[in-house]
Amino acid sequence: MLDLARLRALHAVSVHGSVAAAAVALGYTPSAVSQQITKLERETRTTLLERRGRGVALTDEARHLAATAEELLTIVERAETTLEERRGQPTGQLAIGAFASSARGLLPGVLAELAERHPALDIRLREVDPHLSVDLVARGVIDIAVAHDWDIAPLPTPDGVEQSVIGDDLCDVMVPAAHPLAARSSVRRQELAGQRWICQPPGTVCHDWLVRTLRAAGCEPDLAHQAEENHTQLALVAAGLGIAMIPRLGRGPLPGGVVAVSLDPMPKRRLYALWRTGAARRPAVTATVETLERHWPMVSPAVPATG
C-alpha cells in the first residue's frame, strides 16, 4: 500500500516545482522531502525524479502518481472535514497563505485570538502573493488564502473556491518631505506625470495596478526603483529617490522625511478570504474567516493617513 505522507511529498514537489519549495510548504527540510520520495521510488519501483540542470523534474510516471495523490488528499480532506464537523470544534492543522502586508498588519491579532480560543487548532501561516494564493487554495495546497484585488483587476475565483470580503484597504502617495507635493492635502492622478516612482516588481498586483492606472490617466510612469517590501520603498522615498503608492494596512508609522498625500479619487484594494467549497463545513475554516472579518474594523481605522 502506498504511503500517504510520501505521496503528499511528491504532490508538493509537483505543485511547487522543486524539492526546496516543497519543503518550505510542508514545513520539512529538503533532505526529508528527498528521503520521502526516495522511499516512494523504492516502494513503486519507479523513477519519479530526474535531474534537469541544477534542479529536478518529475517523470511521466511521477506526474500520473502526483495527480492520483491529489485525488487521495482530497478524499482525506473530506473525511477530516466530516470528523471535525461532528466534533463541532476547530481542530487539526490549517494552512493559511496571506500577502505580506496582511500577514504583518492583520494576521498576528487573528492568529493570537484563534490560538487562545481554539488550542486544538494548529494554524500555519506563510506569505504568498495574491497571484499565486488562489490557485494554491484550489489545488488544496493551503486551506485559506487572504488575497486582494484592485478595481481594474478583479480577483479571479475558480470553480470550487468560495470567498468572503474582509474589507477595503486605502492607499496614499508617499512623497519626500521636501517634495513640492508634500504641502498638498490631495493630488489628482493627472498631476503625477513626470514623477520618478518606487514600486513593486513586475508581475505583482500592486505593480500592475500602478502602471495601468497611471497610463489610463495619461501618465507613462518612470519606474526608477523596484522593491518588494513596503518598508524598503518607504526608505527609498525618505532618501528623496522618488514617490510611491503604498496601502495603509501593515504600513506602520512613516519614517522621518516621508509625507503621505491623498490621491483623488483615493485608490483602494479589497481584501478577501478564500477557501475550497469542500472545506466550507470545517469549523476551523468558519472560525478563521469570522475572526478575519471581525478583526478588520479594529485594524483598518487604526492606520492613519500620515505617520
Image: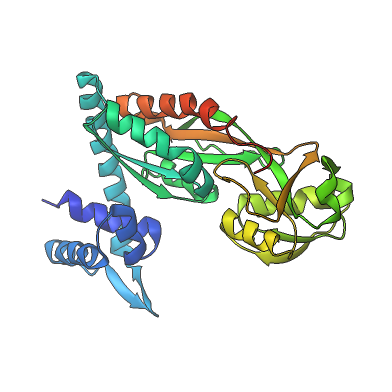
Tell me residue 305's x, y (percent): 68, 39
From the viewer's perspective, is residue 151 above or below residue 133? Answer: above
From the viewer's perspective, is residue 295 above or below residue 260? Answer: above
Tell me residue 80's x, y (percent): 23, 32
How many numbered marks have been drawn onto this rendered protein structure?
0
- At 78% from the left edge and 47% from the top edge, which residue is drawn? 213
Q: Give 156 or 64, whichever is nearer the viewer.
A: 156
Left-right relation of 167 to 125: right
Q: Give 216 or 178, whichever is nearer the viewer.
A: 178
From the viewer's perspective, is residue 193 above or below residue 160? Answer: below
- At 21% from the left edge and 31% from the top edge, which residue is drawn? 120
For the C terminus, the quadrant is: top right
Left-right relation of 231 to 281: right
Tell me residue 24's x, y (percent): 33, 58
Q: Residue furthest front?
A: 256
- At 28% from the left edge and 26% from the top edge, which residue is drawn? 117
Q: Give 153 or 58, whichever is nearer the viewer.
A: 153
Tell me residue 193's x, y (percent): 87, 56
